[in-house]
Amino acid sequence: MTDLTEWFNEHRITEVECLVPDITGIPRGKIMPAQKFHQGGAPRLPESIFIQSVTGEYPEDPDDVLTDPAIIDVKLIPDPSTVRLVPWAHEPTAQIIHDCQYANGRPVPIAPRQVLRQVLALYAERGWKPVLAPELEFYLVGRNTDPDYPLVPPIGRSGRQETGRQSYSIDAVNEFDPLFEEMYDFCEIQELDLDTLIHEEGAAQVEINFLHGDPLSRADQVFLFKRTVREVALRHDIYATFMAKPMGQEPGSAMHVHQSVVDAETGENLFADHDGKPSALFLSFIGGMQKYIPAIMPIFAPNVNSYRRLTRFSNAPINLQWGHDNRTCGLRVPFGEPSAMRVENRVPGADANPYLAFAASLACGYLGMIEGLQATHPFRGSAYSQPYTLPRELSHALEIMEQNKPLIDILGDKLVEVFVAVKRLEYETYLRVISSWEREHLLLNV
């Protein structure tokens, strides 16, 4: 456990950023002098930060079921293991991710970090320990200050924009070497466990892979990485976006989640039998994901834009077939040693809240294991030849989510109630926007 006072003294910290991930996954919190942080007790924020939509609005709550009608404060409790320097700050500044508690010490059930803790506790009760490795895709785009204009790739060192697909191209990555060098420097200062960087299929689309580890620490690292890469991009006069589908003619951005479960005492991978083949527990985990992912889609695809990514022949899944090293499937089992047996959930978008996405993915697998569900036979060929089994739009996905009692019991009825209310508000707000497509094709033709 990190001693915060000692750490602050060692790094001569003068300011502290108290961070809390909200429902969307963006940082909320307070900034305060280091001395006040140590002497002033737990900082507080209104509980309502967890029912704020991405547009800054709050759902109607006539029966006061979402939060306390008094708009009460919750206490921010620092997690010392998350303390890190803020590399871009002018003065020595610490950032610490906080958990949230009510005045009586009870955890706030709608705080995303707490939701993930709840799911991990269920695994721990059975002597299981999940291990995750996220892969996060994002785009670099030119500055865009007018939302009516489409996004375009930024100009690289050559003075030109990318115009063609550059999958795995080293030279395409080198176009933005100064940006990525600073990104890696900032990540190293924050001790983020990055593995590899590749150029993805889209123009100026990049993928960052994280080393495998504890799900809570991986969620913390994705949370901090998103903040870091946005800041670095701005320092280079461009944007970094984690929208699931930022450009109509380019592939979408995903957050693939590699998952395995080990014995908490021995560390043995429970997904492989002694002969190296997939275990019955592994197949039940996959069966749980196949059964329950459709009901948890609003967490994996939380925005109206998210569903634009999930289309046939677009490097994104449309169903929950599973297969060995088959990237057309929603659930992929990579080739590897038995000790590394795992399943890659390819459904979540880069716009998903990592805490909620990891909690939801593990919840689906957990239900499969305790219910003894059976996976389908592994699929061979292109899963794009099969029908859609994932919801096609947000409104339908929300209806399915609020009717699935097993998932509600695991994630918490309060969390699901709040999440559905917030996302339904965002959906209704979106419906009031008239798009350029409608003006172009309907204005004079209907």
Image (cartoon, helix red, strand yellow):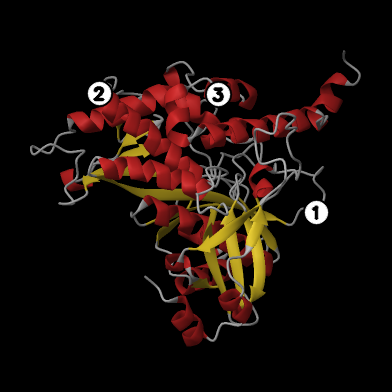
Q: Disc 2 or disc 1, which is closer to the eye?
A: 2
Residue 329 position in % (x across, y down): 39, 29
Residue placed furthest toward the front: 104
Residue 326 seen anywhere in this rendered image of the structure: no
Residue 381 seen in render = yes
Residue 134, position in %: x, y? Answer: 41, 49
Q: Which of marks 3 and 1 is in front?
A: 3
Pointer 2 with pointer 1, Cβ within 8 A: no
Provide the residue designation for mark 2. 372
Total labels drawn: 3
What amino acid is at disc 1? Thr
Q: Is residue 422 left or right of residue 441?
A: left
Label 3 CA crowd tier, 10 Å (few <14, some 14–19, many 20+)? some
- Pick the front one: 331 or 405: 405
Q: Is 163 left or right of 411, judged from the image as shown? A: right
Q: Which amino acid does label 2 sit on?
A: Gly
Residue drawn at the location 33% of the way across and 54% of the way down: 212
Residue 13: image quadrant is bottom right
The residue that label 3 is drawn on is 402
